[in-house]
Image (spheres, coloured by chain):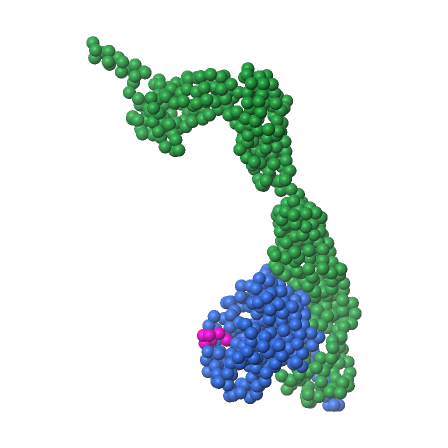
Amino acid sequence: MKTIAILFSLCLTPAWAASNWGMPLVGVARDAKNLIHPVYGVAGSFILRGALSGEAVNWAFAASGGLVEMDGELQVLDAHANVTGRRAAPPGGAVLSPGYAFFAATGELWPAGARAGGSTMIEPAAIAGRVMALGPADQRGIIVAACRASQLWLLTFDVKKGTLMRESAPGGALGEEACAGGGVLLVLRDGILVAAAREIVIQTAQGNERRVPIPVDHGAKIHRAGEDTVQIELPGSPSRIMRITADGEKMYELPAAEARP
Amino acid sequence: MMARLLMLALLSPGFLPAQFNLLLVENGKEVAIPDQLYSFGTKAVGGAVSVEFHLRNAGADTSLTDLHLTSADFEFIPAPALPQTVAAGTAVDLIVQFSPSQPGPSTAGLIANGSQLATFNGTGLASVAVSLQGGSPLPSPLDFGSVERGKSAARRIVVTNGTGGSVLVNIDTTSAQFQVKPAAQFPLDTGAQASLEIDFVPTADGPQQGKLEINQLVYPLTGIGIDPPYPPPQVTFDKASYTSSQQGKLTVQLAAPSEATGTGQVDIVVNPGDASANTDSGIQFLSTGTRTVTFNVNQGDTVGHFGSDTSATFQTGTTAGNIVFTVKLGFFTNAKAITIAPAAVGFDQSQAQRTSAGLDLRLDAFDNTRSTSSMTFTFFDQDGNTLPPGTISVDASGALGRFFASSDLGGVFSLHAFFPVNGNPAQVASVEVEMTNSAGNAQTARLPFTTP
């Protein structure tokens, strides 16, 4: 302990010299024209800046970076929302998390930034259902949320071998709501979000359920927009940004992407 | 002898072979005039009727040197230019107007280069005289000026029966925006007068036209419909007070139901407490992403409509000072300001991670005074004990001040600090950060370090 204390006092000055100040990046968000913008600011004071080129079909972003699915292409974003890589994507659409893309049509799981051939195959029989979302991943495994019949299951696959490591059913009302209708859901480190009629249903890691009202009956889409930020796209209404923290959820309206004042 | 007589007859003007033919124009097409006799029908004395003809040259190119009508009750409108060359096969367009000056039949010949090409007749009908209230002639057009929609302007006219017999007066207008009071039909004894009111009641904006018809007499009417004034607008907010980094809702209230339909706008002007502060792009209306938003007002509305909503959402940004909202509607301008008080630094997101080389700390926050002077970092072990050397202070004013001077995002900033550790970083469990600005001190919660 004494060693650490000494090291702190010795290392502080050069450490501070290496520190920097910048614009806080909340995440990325899609506008009404399907263009992806970096969102700067803090909760309640968001600013959308210049868009990536091309219309986004799907995307997911967190503090370490993210993925954007364009028409036939997957773009890799770094932590500053800059495009650092592109890769032609198989047809059929992808299910995305900030670090992985899963193509149900081919069973391929791509880590962000992987070159052609750098993917893992997951057998459909191991999923035995419809993949709805990708959850958190570490160096060993990734959580895949899949609907088997009308029930949601969380399957953990080995990211290198593609084998099923474990599986569990979250249960509760959310488990069924996630697979009903369009089944729009996100799996985060601290919980699961489902877009239902007039509400977002949140099941925490401890199993508690909370419901946040939204102003539409159907058609809401949710996307991982930042580390603790979710964009909720509402048909006919401005998009919302939901911040999820240990203190709970807070909903904001997303500004339009327009010229700077 | 007979041959010489025939030759003389052919050479006299009235019997020359016709170089010109007069043709009636109906629906844009030329029609022959039977027996070269055309009747203008019956028209009230003081009234007028116009008919279009073509004077067509059936021969070689020639000069038209003479064209006239033999009665003052008939005239060309406008008078043709003379002389003029009329090319072979072409025609001169003529408008002939019959306006009887007295009751009874009237006849005129149309003469072109000495030849009578047609005979016109018409009958004048004894009628009433129409004047303004003071006796002056009715102007043409009778102008009602500019009148707000929903209101009316009146002009009084006098109808006088000078025909020598009783007359049934028929009076009407061709547009519902011009209304006659009190009656549309009434008898009028010889020598008698009747006073009538013509009202202009515009139902639409812009120039409006109509005609006043009294026993075949026609008088053009004109007026301009204009929007009624809007009620005074006022900006109201969904909260009594605001702080930085908030989203609020603004409503435009009208002092009374609007009689007008149109568009207004609300503009934001920011007066930062520190006059030298850079702009704050976070202060904006969300629906436009700018500092201007428009709203619609329809008749009967008591609030402005921002699209389908009755309020507009705005952000207060991260700059202390005043945010002035100015609403403009018609001739009215009204401003209301909200004050954003200077506040201690507000913390937003953070990420504290251990790496193999040390401790990596990211902290997103805002300082609405942009005056942060010092920062402190306090590290804790797994048991919550402060790690020596205790609180570490850093002067942040220079670097952060330079960042604010280059940023257009207001008072937001992201700090990325890295602390090298030569020992085992896992023994450092958490960190607290405190920042001091002109409004006071602010401290983060204890931020736990995680290992990615």
Q: Is residue B224 above or below residue B426?
A: above
Q: Is residue A12 above or below residue B73?
A: below
Q: Position of residue B371 (x, y in %)?
A: 74, 67
Q: Quadrant of residue A241?
A: bottom right
Residue B173 visible here: yes
The hue of chain A in the figure is blue
Q: Position of residue B252 (x, y in %)?
A: 68, 53
The reply, left or right, for residue A143 in relation to residue A245 is left
Q: Quadrant of residue B418?
A: bottom right
Q: Is residue B67 above or below residue B358?
A: above
Residue at x 59% of width, y 61% of height: A258
Q: Position of residue B33 (x, y in %)?
A: 35, 25
Q: Magenta includes A91?
A: yes
Residue at x 65% of width, y 62% of height: B281
Which residue lies most toward the top here?
Answer: B1
Q: Nearer the viewer, residue B174 or A185?
A: B174
In the rendered image, the quadrant that contains the C terminus of chain B is: bottom right
Query: What is the span of residues highlighted in magenta in the rendered image?
Result: A89-94
Q: Magenta includes A155?
A: no
In the rendered image, the quadrant that contains the N terminus of chain B is: top left
Chain coloured green: B
The reply, left or right, for residue A163 in relation to residue B32 is right
